[in-house]
Amino acid sequence: MRNPLKLRKNKEFNYSPRYYKGEGNPFKIEHKLDKFRSTANTKRGLKNKVNSAMDDLKVEGDKNLKLRFLIIVAILVLLFLFVIDFDLSIFLNP
């Protein structure tokens, strides 16, 4: 009889792929762009999150990102105002 308090161990196999001729572990699942991401494989904890956020602020991104973002937001706001039939003439002088 088995002991009901002990769990059964999983079987282990020494399998190596026949046709794999690459580098590293073939069973490790990793995205192609993980090496370029600052958020992949980060350490946990509040201090590490704050440090990584500060490092991200120091890295300068696209120069036109703010302008592009403001244009998209303005178009979406105007589209929303058009859908709800808002009268824009109240902002113009009579």
Image: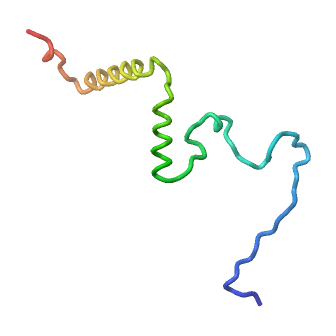
Toward the viewer: 58 or 62?
A: 58
Q: Horizontally, is 2 left or right of 81 in the view?
A: right
Residue positioned most to the bottom: 1
Image: 78 above or below 53:
above
Where's the N terminus, which quadrant? bottom right
Looking at the image, how many numbered discs can be counted on the residues?
Answer: 0
Q: Residue furthest top?
A: 94
Reply above or below: 18 against 81: below
Residue at x 87% of width, y 43% of height: 20
Residue at position x 25%, y 24% from top?
81
Q: Position of residue 56 (x, y in %)?
A: 49, 34
Residue 45 lies, with reference to residue 89, above or below; the image says below
- Residue 45 in the image: x percent, y percent? 49, 53
Observer-nearest of 55 and 78: 55
Residue ranking furthest to the right: 18
- Pick the front one: 75 or 25: 25
Residue that lies at the very extreme toward the left in this rendered image? 94
Q: Quadrant of the C terminus?
A: top left
> Which residue is at 87% across, 49% downward?
17
Q: Quadrant of residue 82?
A: top left
